[in-house]
Image (spheres, rainbow, N blue to C red):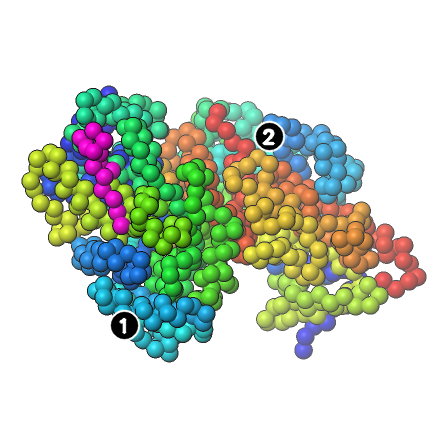
Amino acid sequence: MPGKKRVTTDVLIIGGGVTGTGLARDLALRGISSIVLEKETINAGASGRNHGLLHSGARYVSSDPVSARECKTEGDILKKIAPHCIEKTGGLYIAVKGDDETYISLFPELCKKTGIPCESITVKEALALEPALSENTIAAFRVEDASVDPFHISLENMNQAIEHGARYFNFCKVVHFKIAGKAIQKVTAKNLLNKQVFEIEARVVVNAAGAWSGEIAKLAGIHVDMIYSKGSLLITHSRVAGLVLNRLRIPSDGDILVPGGTVSIFGTTSMRMESLDMIRPTVEETDFLVKEASAMVPQLEKTRYIRAYAGVRPLISDPEGDQSGSGDDRSVSRGFSLIDHQAENIENFITITGGKMTTFRLMAEKAADRVGDKLHHKRQCRTAILPLKSKAPTRMTEAGMSFRLWSGKGKTEDITLCECEMISKNQFKELITWLKKTRKTSDLNALRVHSRLGKGACQGTFCSQRVTGFMYDEDYLKSDEGIYNIKDLLRERFIGQRPVLWDGQLAQAELNEALFCGFYGLDLEKPL
Amino acid sequence: MEAVHKTDLLIIGSGLSGMSAAVFAANRNIRAVVAGGAGGFEYSSGLMDLWGRSLTEKREITKKPWDMLEKLSEQEPEHPLAKIKKETIQLAFSELTAALKKQGLTYSGHKEKNTLVMTPFGTLRPTYRLPLAMVSNSEAFRKKEPCLIIDFKGLREFSAVFVKEMMKKRWKHLRAQTLEFPDTRLQKEVFTPMLARSLETEQVQDKFLTLIRSAVKDETWIGLPAILGIYSSEKILKRLETESGLNIFEIPTSPVSVPGIRLREALMKSLENTSVTLLQNQRVTKVVPLPKGEFHCETGSDINPVTIHTKAILLATGRFLGGGLYADQKRIHETLLGLPVYQPENRSQWHKMNYFDLDGHRINRAGIETDDLLRPVTPGKRPVSETLFASGTLLAHQDWIRTRCGSGLSIATGFKAIEAYLQIRQGSQGKPL
């Protein structure tokens, strides 16, 4: 526990993204203890900032057939072990007038060669399946894409790991490695909330910090050459299409539209960044994405957007990977890298990075195998067989799920606190109780991470006050904590709202500001 | 058959600015029509601010609105309030509050200073004028005597504990309690307008008295969410206070706001039997300028659309929420006449990165620029029309939200627009308008 001076574990995992949590689950199921150290919250990095697309593999058939095959295998496994986190929407590859016809004609051949199921359908059939498609559609193929909730996956990973003995510390940052001989002997970490510094003794340290992997490696004096490639995405107010829609062209900007519960998500951009500061979606990227994507789905030009977000792909610079020589970060291999730092004379330190959401389980398995070797632990990986399911209330991360859970239970005493996402008082209560018990924290941002709070059309205007009031009533909040909770939530939400503030969403933002600044005066509130 | 109204002045927009202007027009016996939607009153606190934030480096709540307005004339001469004299603003407030008082809604306050009122967030909001039911709100906080804050079972918009916890560092003798409002046992959710309406009957008032009597311990002050009636709030307050012997006050409540509805109702009533016709729920959707400075207008109601022929227009259509302004992906537009809108160069400039940036978002200062008679101007600073005026939050060069000047801006520019209209009309006497 962060409060103590020193903790010990078999494995320290740095990073609570889908890879880190996946690794914690894998190790736990093998009987190896671990601690996950996360400087923010679950999926705060790229794991929570992607399309939520379970790739069929078709996207990589030309550029990276190995990744394509991995996607296919891993996608099939996840559909089996975590069906509750996945919506088997199916997907389409769509070409519109003006797209490269050579690529179109090669596509089915490449899929076949790589072993990715792909069925050619007529334009008429495609339009019947997905009326949102452009009338300029010239070719269409069906693939096995699906929509996945990355938060749900990571929460299940972590919760199942915790149920098998793993520990999770959030808002804790690694500040120092003490290296003695050929090993990291001690890791110093800092709890960013209470500023306490503590030490972790682990037999193996795994760097699963995603885009921050380079910074972590640097603490051990090791250079990992990272490329920071920012990808921005947009969330629509309501679901635009039933299937995953991919633009049939060489991977480019704004060519994937993924349904996610009651909304749709599309993107991305790919922009080389010099550093990890100020990773935010911009107005320019938003406008560019809208323009690009509306070629495939024209209504995207007129639709209402709730927010934008940006993530950084954790890519490792590999001169040989950039085969096209185009300099586009998309052509850097999306396969993953497992780096054993034994080569740099630190025997108990591994970096696992790169890859993608769809293949996280495989990445975790390979990393856990290497950890097992180092610990002389022989037990086999079981993550591909056992259901990825915990006892925790994680289902509330999914859009529309709260209402289904709630209406199913038929609790007539209950009242709705969040109307956009239909989350009730008792659901928040259950979640807060659980957070208190397992996470020792239950602020509004934690509730946001673990549910749909603040993610609907109002972006927190009404629900944040109601939920805060409720938390005060239930004694979860004291003194003036509540308004700083709300301020944090609104500040965080605004980063994503800012690029999409026009039309109706701008009017909503105006009301929001009139209430929170004009009426309640939060802009001028400072801690007493 | 569509109804056709012929009028001298059409006030478009029935928010605080449009409705205030309508009251001023009625007092001057101007033949006018006011058309609009709900006016946003249900989102307002029911307080009337004038200026509530300091203009110094250190941004904080201010109790000295007039000092700030003086400073404003130096710092921001283009601000609509910087162009109105103190005496005129005072006249506007007193004329409006006198009209409201006639309808049983008394607004009071210090002539020179702001009053601080407790909000449902347990923060303090500066206001220039406040309704009677909130006078004790500020007094209670000043005296800090034992006070009970009450909320109600099933009411999501107000938490007494929230207010108490926020206040407790500054006010020790504060207690919070949840009560079940009379006759709501079977309702799982209750709303403030619903409670306010039921308190209009004496029967419920009696039960309510029993309820609060049983709740108080040593407290002499009671704070409630704003629910003390809609039409006869002052009578209800007086009766409850007299019979309980307690000081009772309201805390303005999050939308749907009862004090806002009271204000709207009183404004509407004050227009009855006057020279002003109110067209409720009739949003003007089309304005066609005619020769000689007249206008042909249509409302967009599905049920009974109205055509209005008017000699002058006061545009009080509000901003994005009110519908006076509309932003597409690139630009901000004025929705009815396509008037030029003062605005930042592009969308990247609209908002600051930090939501709570103390300088405020640039888009908030976008709006309609006018001449000294509040007539919208062309980019060459010439009036678009001799007989077209604009008032309220639609105007450019102000950030009413951050500086807490929404009511003052709306009322004072509404007043000035009516005066300007009369001036133009008189100036053109003998000539058709």
Q: Is residue A135 visible?
A: yes
Tell me the crowding category of disc 2: few under 14, some 14 to 19, or many 20 or more residues within 10 angstroms, Cα based. Answer: some
Mark 1 residue type:
Glu
User: Left or right: where does residue B291 sit relative to residue A517?
Assistant: right
Residue at far left of view = A378
Where is residue B217, by image quadrant?
top left
Nearer the observer: mark 1 or 2; the answer is: 1
Give the residue at x 37% y 40%.
Answer: A445
Residue B369 image point, x, y percent: 73, 49
Question: Residue B59, which numbered label?
Answer: 2
* Subunit of label 1: A
Where is residue A196, by image quadrant?
top left
Vertical relation: B130 (above or below) B143: below
- Is disc 1 in contact with disc 2, using a CB cutoff of under 8 Å? no
Instruction: List the residue tagged with mark 1.
Output: A119
Picture mark count: 2
User: Left or right: where does residue A429 sit relative to residue B243?
Assistant: left
Q: Quadrant of the N terminus of chain A?
A: top left
Give the residue at x 27% y 72%.
Answer: A119
**Extent of the magenta region:** A335-351
Where is residue B98, by image quadrant?
top right
Tell me the crowding category of disc 1: few under 14, some 14 to 19, or many 20 or more residues within 10 angstroms, Cα based. Answer: some
Q: Is residue A346 magenta?
A: yes
Residue B315 image point, x, y percent: 71, 56
